[in-house]
Image (spheres, rainbow, N blue to C red):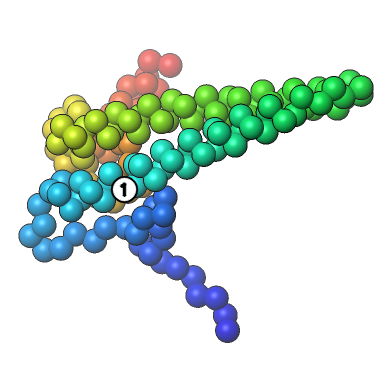
Amino acid sequence: MPATKKKASEELIHGVKPHRPKRGEPYMGDVQTDHFRQILNAWKQELVDDIDRTMSVMQDETINLPDPNDRATLETDRSLELRTRDRERKLIKKINDSLADLDKRDYGYCEDCGVEIGIKRLEARPTANLCIDCKSLNEIREKQNA
C-alpha cells in the first residue's frame, strides 16, 4: 500500500498536533495558551536532550589520536558541535522568555504594535514576538543600516 503524504496542517509541531481554533474561541485563551505551552516545553526538552547527549559524547571522546589529520577532524567536529549547542542555548533562553510571556498573558501579541501575531505564525515560529508586518519592517531597517 503506498504511503500517503501528510498535509502540512497534519504535521506535528515538536510532537504536538497543530491547533484548529473553534468558532468563537478567544485568542490566547486557556486552550491556546495550553497548546503553546505544550509546544514550547516539548521543544525545550528536545534541545536539553540534545545538549545532554552532546556532553556525554564529548566526555567519552577523550581519545588521543596519533594522526594529526584525525585530531584536526575531531577538533573541527567538536567546534561545530559547540557552536550549534551555543545557538541552542540561546534558543532555550528565547523559549523561557516565551513561557514567561505566557504566564503574564503577553504571549501571542506583537511587542511593537500590540496586534495578534496569529496562531499559524506562532506554530511556525513559537518564539515569535513580532507580527509579520513589524518583523518585515525591522528586517528592512537592518538591511538599510548594514
According to the picture, the residue beneath numbered tag 1 turns out to be 38
Place of residue 25 in the rendered image (x, y in percent of width and height, measured from the top left): 11, 57
Quarter of the picture containing the C terminus is: top left
Amino acid type at circle 1 is Gln
Pick whichever, 61 or 2, lies toward us: 61
Q: Residue furthest right?
A: 66
Residue 108 position within the rendered picture, expressed as x and y whole percent measured from the top left: 21, 40
Residue drawn at 64 percent across, 32 percent down: 56
Residue that sits furthest to the bottom in the current view: 1
Give the vertical position of 10 relative to 78 (above or below): below
Q: Is residue 3 left or right of residue 41?
A: right
Q: Secondary structure at mark 1?
A: helix
Q: Residue at x 21, y 32 (%)?
A: 101
Tell me if mark 1 has few (under 14), some (14-19) or many (20+) residues whose alpha carbon lies within 10 angstroms of its own.
Answer: some
| Residue drawn where x is 86% and y is 27% of the image | 70
The image position of residue 133, as x and y in percent, is 24, 36
Front position in the image: 64 or 132 = 64
Name the image quarter holding residue 105. Answer: top left
